[in-house]
Structures are given as C-alpha cells and as structure tokens.
C-alpha cells in the first residue's frame, strides 16, 4: 500500500467527521458563489441599469430570477437595501460554514495524530531491545513528535483544503461559464501552464524534505544525549567543543531548510505571476467583441463580477498549486513514521501462548546467543535452577553474565537452544505472565520523574499506601524518604537525580519487595555503592532474597560466598560450577578471580591505613 493510502486508512474512525466537514465545505463554497450571484443585481442597482434593455448573460438572468421574489414591486432604493441585506446574510452563513468546517477538520486531524502517535508508541514497546541500543533516542523522539505532527498535513489539512479549494474553483467556474463561456475557456486553457510549472519543483522538494527530517532528528538526538551527559561535559571541560559541534550541526540543518524552502517558496511567486497575467488577459478580452456575449462586449457589472470571481479563484488555485509541495513535505515525514511502524515486532506472544507458572525449576539447555551478526556472546549454556535456590553468576567482564540473565525474562531470545520453566519452553509462555514471576534489581536503577510512592508502586497500580511504606521500610528506605520535602509525595526528577546511588537502589529494592515475585534477578546491585550505602542495600537485599529463587550477578565475590551454587562464565561458556568451598579448592578461574580481588582489596586497605 502506498504511503498516501496508508495515511488515508487512518481516517476510517473519522469518516463521520470527514463527511460532515466536506458537507460544510460544500455549503460554504456554494454560499461563496451565491454572494457573487447577488452582486450583479446590486451593481445594476448602483449603476442604474436595472431593467435596462440589452443583451444579458445567463448569470444575470439567473440572478434576476433568484432575487425576483425579494425585490418585486420594490422601489430602487428599497430593492438595493434588500439585496444588501441578502448579501450580508449570505456572507454570515458562508463564514459560519467555513468556521464549522475548520473546527471539524481540526478535530479530525488531531484525532489522527493521536491515533498514529499512539500506535507508533505501542509498536516501539514491542521492538527488540537491540533496536534501542543501536538507535539514538532523539531520532525516535523526533519521529514521535515532529514527524507524526507533519503527517496530518497530508491527509487532513491538505486533503480538506484540497476539497475546499476545489469546490470554490468548481462553483466559481460555473459562475464564470454562465457569465461568458469564451472567457472561461481562455481561463482554463492557461491553467495547465501553472500545473506544469509547479510539477517541476516537486521531485527536488521531496528529496530535500526527507533529508531535512533526518537532520532534525539528529539535532534532537544530540540535544537529548548531551544534556543527559552535562556532568561529563563539565568534568572534562568540553563545553566549547560541544558548542562548536552543535553549531555545525545546526548550520547543516539550516542549509537543509533553506534548500527545502527554496523550492517550496517558488510555488507562490509562480502562481502569483500566473494570476496577474490572467487578470490582465481577462480585462483585455472582456472588453472586446470576440469574448463578449452575442458579439457585444460584456456589460460593466458582468465584467466586474467575472473579474471578482476570477480573482476569488486565484487564491484556491494558488493553494492547489502548493498542495503538491505541502504533500511532499508531509510524505517525507510519513515515510520515517512508517519505516518505524514496519520494523518487525519481537516482543509479542505466539498464538496459543499459555500463562507461566513456577513451582519446580528453570533449566537452560544448550543456549547460545549473539547480537545481530556479531560473534556469539553465549555458547552452549546448560544448567538449572531449582525453586528456592540461590545461584550466582561470576566471571570476568564481557563473559556474558548480564546477557544470560536477560534471556530469562525474554528481553532477548536465544539464537539456539531453549530455556524451560517447569518443563515448558519460555517461547510458549505469555511474556506478561512470565515477567510477573520476576523482579529485577540492576546496577543502574531506573526511576521516573514521579513521586517516591509512584516509583515504588510502579507496576502495581492502585496499591494502598500502607503496603508501599512497609516495602520502603523493609528496603531501609523509609528513613531518608521521611526527610524529603514532601515524604512519599516528593517528585524525584528525571531518572531520580535528586537521590544518591544508594537511595535509588533502595527505592528499586522496595519496588521489587512490593512486587513480591517468586524469582529475583540481581545484576551487580551493590557494585557502584560506597561502604555505608552498600551495607544498607545489602541488608535490604537479604530481606528481599528470603524465600525466593535468586539469580545473582556479583562483581564482589565476597557477596556470593553463601550462594547455593556458583556458575563461572568465561568468554560465553560455563567453565566451572559448584559452591564456594568446592570452587576455591579446585583452584580454577573462580579461585584466581577471588585471590586477585582480595589481594587488591587488601592493598587498598593497607594504603588507607598508612594514610
């Protein structure tokens, strides 16, 4: 399906509004023509030629027939007053219909934007996490805001304007034809020249519009990324370099806009010149016998009416000539929107997926995984976790620990092999029910710009405040929360920047406690904390781990010595497995990592004591 028809398909829920909008537009156009029809008798009354003998046009005959019931038997002054009143009433209703049409179009186009933006956001939530890791957030924000807004121009503002202008032209052409079919043919004969001139501009305009949209997305991405890294920029003193870089990017965007406007703006002067030439031609031709009626030049009132109608037609002709330019810009944005919508969704369930349950074990069977076309990150991973067991994953950086735990809630799908929960392959289970069995606490705590209570209760809408406070207390968070300006109702700012790292971690633990899931995933939850914060967080984690099945990644091996089982990874493979004592005696990779870590910690401790 073409982009144009895909956009039109989004109008289906608004067919009623669209039809009503078209109807009011039609009425406004007819009333607009009615004012011209009424104008001829008014001009005759003003020129004092009413009732004079001579050749009359079909339009004059029609206007006299139309107004005869209102002016019959009236004196010239009274007839003029009645015609003026009718003209004013026509203008009032015409503009009322135009206003109603514009409001209906606004309701339709904003509904379209809401639906398209909502569908795009819903679709983004189903894409693979790898997509978000390789795509700049600013590009997605630009697509969600600017591009979606721009697309409404194609199917609502432009489409409605096209119909409105077309109706005005059609009604006006009827009036022109009834006035002088010869002059009307002359007018129509020149129209293709305008259309051909405008068409030459469109290809380049479409190309530059698409490039401009891409550049706008890059600017949005840069702003979002650099403002999020403001501390890094200041710490390394790169403000000037970043400002120059952004200036260069802004200048490239400026050039893109200028190139686009160069072709877009040409449509107005081209149509203006065309309109001026047409008016001059009409004035000249209307005063000759060749283009008059019955070999007689047009009467002054008829020529004035024809000229007014022609001039009235110039504005919609200009708008119609600009319609392809407007459409080209809108379709360039629509291409970007539909490119995102056409990306294959990955985070969706297979038909017939069943609810997940967990009562016995989770088993990894020959699981391998790679990102895209890269080298394998995991190779032939096989182990199981019994209900209630605490299993620790350790290994050097890049061993694949985080990737492994991300496979359990199906953030990624294995390249080969399978993962079973109570004997059921994960890909047969509903994602929502599967993830409801798990709580995740990572090193980078994600908090939203919302209240403390809302962040703790995230994923548990409607939970009562008492349960939120009990979870915070169990997470050693209640004390610092009570010292915040508004307690649990304090807004945390973007990403929770008002809190320290340890405080953010305790909020995350409170969130996991409130979720009360049977499976707990801990991904280096204490690695970035100072000693005091680590102690408080570790106490909270120990409460969180009670009576749960736990899969823990730990950088500090001292924190996993009490795990039921330790799985050692290296270069994506399991190289050892056992409890702390078994692995320590074995003298393999675990022992080497353990000795290296504690030797470094002893060295740091000795240096600290000497100071």
Image (cartoon, helix red, strand yellow):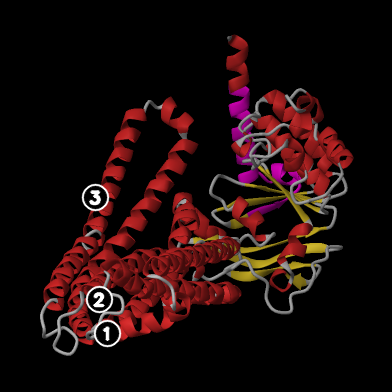
Residue 548: x and y in percent read: 84, 50
Sequence-first tag of 1 and 3: 1
Q: Overall secondary structure of the magenta stretch? A: helix
Q: Determine which residue is flagged by label 2.
A: 302
> Label 1 vs label 2: CA separation?
8 Å
Q: Which element is circle 1 on? A: loop
Task: Tell me, yes or no, whether the two marked residues, 1 and 2, touch with CB atoms within 8 Å.
Answer: yes
Specify whether residue 585 is painted magenta. Answer: yes
Quarter of the N terminus within the rendering: bottom left
Quarter of image, res 479: top right
Residue 57: mark in rendering: 1
At 65% from the left edge and 60% from the top edge, which residue is drawn?
407
Task: Tell me, yes or no, whether the two marked residues, 3 and 2, touch with CB atoms within 8 Å.
Answer: no
Q: Residue furthest top?
A: 611
Circle 3: is it few (<14), some (14-19), or many (20+) Cα within 10 Å? few
Sequence-first tag of 1 and 2: 1
């Amino acid at each position: 399906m073409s982009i144009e028809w895909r956009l039109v398909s989004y109008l289906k829920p608004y067919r009623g509004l669209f039809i009503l909008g078209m109807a009011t537009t039609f009425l406004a156009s007819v009333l607009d023509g009615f004012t011209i029809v009424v104008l001829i008798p008014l001009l005759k009354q003003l020129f004092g030629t009413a009732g004079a003998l001579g050749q009359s046009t079909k339009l004059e005959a029609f206007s006299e027939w139309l107004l005869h019931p209102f002016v019959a038997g009236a004196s010239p002054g009274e007839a003029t007053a009645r015609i003026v009143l009718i003209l004013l009433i026509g203008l009032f209703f015409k503009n009322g219909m135009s206003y109603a049409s514009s409001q209906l179009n606004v309701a339709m186009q904003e509904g379209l934007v809401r639906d398209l933006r909502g569908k795009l956001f819903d679709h983004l939530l189903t894409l693979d996490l790898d997509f978000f890791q390789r795509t700049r957030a600013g590009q997605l924000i630009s697509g969600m805001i600017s591009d979606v807004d721009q697309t409404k121009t194609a199917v609502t503002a432009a489409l409605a304007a096209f119909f409105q202008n077309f109706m005005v032209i059609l009604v006006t052409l009827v009036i022109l034809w009834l006035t002088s079919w010869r002059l009307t043919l002359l007018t129509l004969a020149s129209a293709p020249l305008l259309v051909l001139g405008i068409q030459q501009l469109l290809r380049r305009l479409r190309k530059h519009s698409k490039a401009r949209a891409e550049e706008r997305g890059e600017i949005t991405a840069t702003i979002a990324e650099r403002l999020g890294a403001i501390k890094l920029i200041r710490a390394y003193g790169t403000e000037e370099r970043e400002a120059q870089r952004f200036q260069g990017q802004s200048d490239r965007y400026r050039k893109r806009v200028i190139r686009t406007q160069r072709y877009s703006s040409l449509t107005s002067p081209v149509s203006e010149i065309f309109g001026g030439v047409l008016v001059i031609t009409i004035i000249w031709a209307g005063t000759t016998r060749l283009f008059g009626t019955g070999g007689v030049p047009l009467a002054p009132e008829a020529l004035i009416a024809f000229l007014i109608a022609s001039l009235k037609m110039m504005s919609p002709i200009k708008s119609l000539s600009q319609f392809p330019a407007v459409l080209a810009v809108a379709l360039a944005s629509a291409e970007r929107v539909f490119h995102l919508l056409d990306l294959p969704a990955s985070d969706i369930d297979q038909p017939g997926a069943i609810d997940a349950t967990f009562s016995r074990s989770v088993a990894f069977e020959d699981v391998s995984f790679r990102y895209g076309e890269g080298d394998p990150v995991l190779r032939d991973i096989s182990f199981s976790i019994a209900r209630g067991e605490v299993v620790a994953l350790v290994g050097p950086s890049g061993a694949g620990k985080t990737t492994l735990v991300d496979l359990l809630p199906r953030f990624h799908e294995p390249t080969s092999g399978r993962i079973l929960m109570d004997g059921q392959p994960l890909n047969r289970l509903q994602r929502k029910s599967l993830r409801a069995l798990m709580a995740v606490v990572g090193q980078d705590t994600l908090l939203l710009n919302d209240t403390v209570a809302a962040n703790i209760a995230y994923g548990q809408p409607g939970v009562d405040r008492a349960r939120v406070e009990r979870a915070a207390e169990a997470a050693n968070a209640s004390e610092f929360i009570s010292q915040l300006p508004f307690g649990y109702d304090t807004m945390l700012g973007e990403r929770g920047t008002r809190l320290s790292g340890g405080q953010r971690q305790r909020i995350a633990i409170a969130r996991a406690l409130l979720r009360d899931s049977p499976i707990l995933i801990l991904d280096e939850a204490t690695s970035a904390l100072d000693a005091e914060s680590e102690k408080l967080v570790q106490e909270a984690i120990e409460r969180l781990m009670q009576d749960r099945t736990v899969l823990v990644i730990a950088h500090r091996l001292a924190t996993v010595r009490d795990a039921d089982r330790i799985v050692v990874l290296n270069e994506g493979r399991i190289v050892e497995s056992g409890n702390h004592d078994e692995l320590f005696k074995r003298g393999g990779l675990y022992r080497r990592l353990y000795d290296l870590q504690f030797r470094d910690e002893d060295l740091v401790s000795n240096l600290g004591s000497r100071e």
